[in-house]
Amino acid sequence: MTANDKAGGKAEAAVLFDVDGTLIDTVYLHTVAWWEALRQQGAEVPMARVHRCIGMGSDHLLATLLGEDRDKDMDDTLSAAHDTLYAQYWSRLVPLPGAGDLVRACAARGWRVVLASSAKQNEAEVMLRALGAGDAIAAVTTADDVSSSKPAPDLVQQALEKAGVEAGQAVFVGDAAWDGKAAGKAGVRCLGVLSGGWSREELAAAGMEAVYDSPADLLAHLADSILATPTLD
């Protein structure tokens, strides 16, 4: 149970964090794992294309990379291969600089912190341990909780429900255009970080109203950001 949970009642506002590429340095590990999983099944997709799909759930990722007319019977095989390949890195996952401190700082300011990850539950648990800030996190939402992943708004909406706040009282923080699109569809304001490999211009075009170099950069500018106080107009 976290400090927010112990306080009881609804939080005044919530900050929803994507995890892969936003708090944990995993984007390129996922890129390699999907690239190899696809190659194992004879699909040679350049890593640059794979990278642009990280942040989507596997349903949208495979449709984007292989097309809607692909043999969908192979989706489970591809996803399982990715999971096996990616699991080799679990023991070496590390948070991005400043990520744990950012989460704790938001909680200390009164935000209810909810993680909203496109990862499966077991992957999310590994990342939560790597982050080392579980005492500041009120809840975690994963791909297992929703029927459609980002850029659909389902994950953000589920995170709002777990946070106990309305869309207008939340901020989403992510690293990919898919985060901005999902947040926008859910009516949630969004901030971006460049640690996932997208450009500042791309994230702004996806609806992120401010973009920071990294979690550490957002932490350094927290007092001047929309996360300065958990009261949103």
Image (cartoon, rainbow, N blue to C red):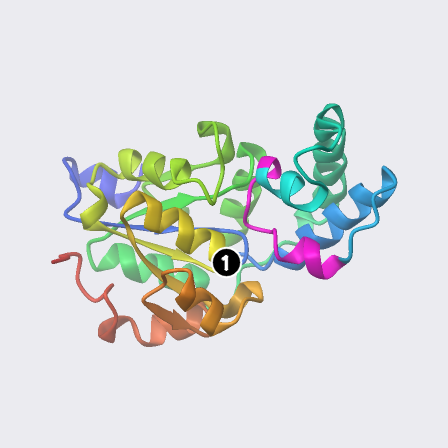
Label count reads 1
Q: Identify the secondary structure beneath mark 1.
A: loop
Between 12 and 174, the residue placed more toward the observer is 174
Between 57 and 82, the residue placed more toward the observer is 57
Residue 100 x %, y %: 43, 59
Residue 228 x %, y %: 21, 67
Along the horizontal axis of the image, is 33 left or right of 152? right
**Quarter assignment of residue 211:** bottom left
Three-letter amino acid code of the residue under disc 1: Ala
Q: Residues within 10 Å of mark 1 (few under 14, many from 20)?
A: many
Q: Which residue is mark 1?
A: 176
Residue 133 x %, y %: 42, 52
Q: Is residue 39 above or below residue 104?
A: above
**Quarter assignment of residue 47:** bottom right
> Which residue is the extreme one toward the front?
69
Residue at screen point 28% across, 50% down:
188
Between 53 and 166, the residue placed more toward the observer is 53
Which contiguous range is marked in magenta? 47-59
**Quarter in which the C terminus is drawn:** bottom left
Along the horizontal axis of the image, is 154 left or right of 118? left
Residue at screen point 32% across, 66% down:
209
